Amino acid sequence: MTDFLLELRSEEIPARMQAKARDDLSKLFTAELAKAGIATSAIVTYATPRRLTLIARDLPLETAAVSEETKGPKTSAPPQALEGFLRKTGLTREQLVDRNGTLFAVTEKPGRATAAVLAEAIPAIVRAFPWPKSMRWGDASASTESLRWVRPLQGIVALLGEEIVPFEIAGIASGAATLGHRFHHPYQITIGGAHDYVEKLRACHVIVDHDERATLIRDHAREAAMQAGLELIEDEGLVAENAGLTEWPIPLLGQFDPAFLDVPPEVIQLTARVNQKYFVCRDADGKLANAFVCTANIAAHDGGAKIVEGNRKVLAARLSDAKFFYDTDLKVPLEEQAEKLSKIVFHEKLGTLADKVDRVAKLARWLVEEGIVTSAPSPLWGEGWGEGLPSSATPGTAPHPNPLPAGEREQLATHAERAARLAKADLVTGMVGEFPELQGLMGGYYAAAQGEHPAVATAIRDHYKPVGQGDDVPTDPVTVAVSLADKLDTLFSFFSVGLYPTGSKDPFALRRAMLGVIATILKSKLRFPFTKIARTQYNLPDRPLAWFLDFLDERLKVQQREAGVRHDLIDAVFALGGEDDLVRLLARVHALQAFVITEDGANLLAGYKRAANILKKEAPSAPSPPRGEGRGEGLPSSAAPGTAPHPDPLPAGEREQETLSYTPEPAETALMTALDSAEPRATAAIAREDFAAAMAALASLRAPIDAFFDSVIVNDSDPAKRSARLALLERVRAAVHNVADFSKIEG
């Protein structure tokens, strides 16, 4: 057993491609060797800007001999069948083996030298390598059949043990020689094998391990900042990029003109990071310092002084450009900038960006005027999801507990509309044109500098948030109103013209927008009427609304997965129909999740499913599915959100007046009595949004249901008994459906 070393040396490989190239090389190599029946105990890959390397451990020197057999026709088969089999295998009749009247072709394949296998495999790997971008070079590039590689390939090291594996790719012969560092050791090095490759290159100022280079950059950059009395602003992406740009990294600290600190710190950091790959630092007060850390690829004799000075000049030029953009943008009021949005198409079916801004501004104001967004977002009453509900409150509704006085609400609505009308204005500024990543942020800076109210400037700055998992979720009411209005307008607008996410395709980032909406609503515990907004503000028809609510359901399950909320329980509550208040929905889901893991909950679920199965089998036409299966289709405007009455309820008092034509069994009577008690208690608890109490009311049905199934025959031969008992089971199902559709619950 021996090790194999492969190094593919080229001109500079882009840093962003190196990690995937290592994975691809490992996968392709493993696949090629598997074809020859060769396995390796381990594969290690390395990448630097100039080389892609693989070391395969413990390869055999030869492949094992293989005996292959192919089943043929019966000995009694017609001559034509035998002739066809002989042509296929290339054998004669005498070479076939007869086993119990069936002919077999047995072929012995001798083992091959592993070096020969590798000599065929490596060229195939190189020619099939899936670089995101590749190129041809030299005279051969005139032919489309010439080799493509990420950058011109210059050398190949291929050693099995200490022996060269001979092959040639595009005129480049494999060997044992490579080059060291471009400046410190630009000479040939003869590699003895996989065992000395890493250390020989280290001696020639090349660290082949990306992770080692990254650790060195991270640690030395921190140390350089600390020695200057500063703190490095951590940036793992920048660490990885610098590690991909250097073979012998040397972090160096420099300073720039403090006058540039008048520019917003995010602009300085982005300029340094994107354009120059520099780290920046903060001082003891947490403010951005006029210092940067660059990563050289050489250990300079002067300690890096000239390198730092050169990098300082380049950064100064970049920062001068940034300061010019900033100063120029400040001279133009955001209102004037916003007028240019009418020339930018948002979407061909949805008008210009100015049209979108107008819709967002109106929706942001409406959200405040309706009391949906207020100055004091808070949870349901008393944190107990219903405790302290005013006696005058309408069951199933949830007005904000501290409504704003009219004057304050008007002021908040005015700020929200103002922020919305200016929120997109920075898209046409010079700074955002240079750095699109700063959209929103620069608008906030410009708004503050131009005298806008602080709440307006904050809303402009943060209205895109949250833009991803882990991002800050806004809580300031003006920001919340604008952020929600912006994302909801995108969602409702695209749904209104039939443009939905499909499969893995989501060109308008609607999934991200919905997750942002959900996170913002739940953070501030807003009582949010999606259906009402869709209908009153966007005239969304039933079918797109149904799809929207399905989409909301899907994204809510994704968002809640990390919180440990079961997706089937969300489905169980959504299936009731008419529920689009996420705060109330999740309160119900949390209570349901706590309930179903108890013994009472598990047994009630089992009893419910038994009842539902009997009803499905014995009386399929009697019960109807809960209202709202279409997620919004046909939902009456007067329906109380979160309620799910049976579609064919008995007239008031009829159920109590109904008399049986037979004497019910004790367990039957006990279940009717339990339902008479549990149903009104559960209904009242749901009306005041005390879902834990609703679950407790249902829990009282567990024992009577168990006893009923133990001693009562539902499918009795007496039609009257059968009908009454099926009706009783329907009452059980309806009582449970008042809380959630238990048929959606797994288990």
Image (cartoon, rainbow, N blue to C red):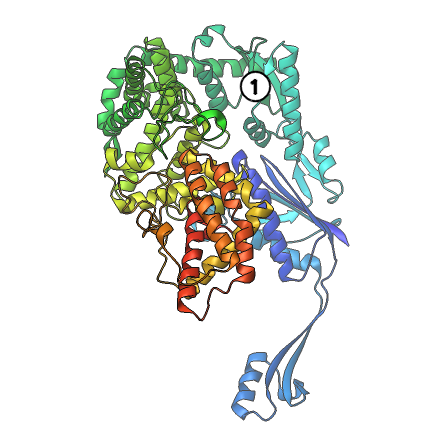
Q: What element carries label 1?
A: loop
Q: Residue furthest right?
A: 1
Left-right relation of 126 to 263: right
Question: Is 37 rendered above or below residue 334?
Answer: below
* Horizontal and vertical percent position of residue 113: 71, 61
* Quadrant into which the N terminus falls: bottom right
Task: Count residues near mark 1 (Cα–Cα under 10 Å), then give few for <14, some for 14-19, many for 20+.
Answer: some
Q: Can residue 559 be seen in this view?
A: no
Q: In which quarter of the image is residue 500?
A: top left
Q: In which quarter of the image is residue 73?
A: bottom right
* Horizontal and vertical percent position of residue 47: 61, 38
Left-right relation of 192 to 153: right
Which of the pair 195/694 is nearer the observer?
694
Question: Is 430 rendered above or below residue 90?
Answer: above
Q: Which residue lies furthest to the top in this view?
A: 259
Question: Is 660 rendered above or below residue 68?
Answer: above
Left-right relation of 437 to 223: left
* Horizontal and vertical percent position of residue 298: 63, 23
Give the residue drawn at x 49%, y 53%.
671
Disc 1 residue type (three-letter): Ile
Which residue is denoted by mark 1 in the rendering?
Answer: 233
**How many numbered marks are there?**
1
Which of the pair 346/304 is nearer the observer?
346
Which of the pair 305/20 is nearer the observer?
20
